[in-house]
Amino acid sequence: MSLLQQGLIVVDGDYELATDRCKDPSIDSKTDYSPGVMLAFQAMVGTVWWVIVMVNYSKNNLELKIDNVSTVPLVWAFMMLTDPTYGWTAASVLANFLVYGIVSVPELIAWIAYLFGEN
């Protein structure tokens, strides 16, 4: 039987029995806040992205214009949704806005409620 099968760990020539991580967790789950922090970071990034998508446009060739007036992407998407040339682009901007709004904003609100101890 090999050392690995016996549950031994060899470190610098010393033999140690492997510890069962389920019996002896190194991090107490009652005081481990790292999963909550990771979820909060992801929710914050998603919400910031949602706001950026509403108002930011990186000009490629043309500006977003309606009746020769520059506008923000969200307004442009609503106005150009039925346009035969830009309709699918407008639909993708609206879908991005709606999906991030439906997922990230409530997620951030739920994390804030968790932070203050609400159930």
Image (cartoon, rainbow, N blue to C red):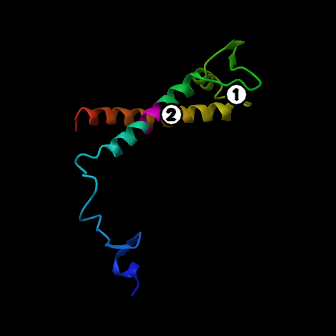
Asked whether the beta carbons under mark 1 and mark 2 sit within 8 Å of each other, the answer is no
| Quarter of the picture holding the N terminus | bottom left
Q: Range of the magenta residues?
A: 42-47
Crowding at mark 2 (Cα within 10 Å: few <14, some 14-19, many 20+): few
Given residues 46 and 32, the one toward you in this image is 32
Task: Give the residue drawn at x 72%, y 20%.
Answer: 63
Residue at numbered disc 1: 83
Task: Give the residue drawn at x 41%, y 69%.
Answer: 12
Q: Is residue 53 left or right of residue 88?
A: left
Crowding at mark 1 (Cα within 10 Å: few <14, some 14-19, many 20+): few
Q: Secondary structure at mark 1?
A: loop
Task: State which mark lies toward you, 1 or 2.
Answer: 2
Q: Main secondary structure of the magenta part?
A: helix
Q: Secondary structure at mark 2?
A: helix
Label of residue 98 in the image: 2
- Whether 99 is drawn above or below 4: the answer is above
Q: Is residue 4 left or right of residue 62?
A: left
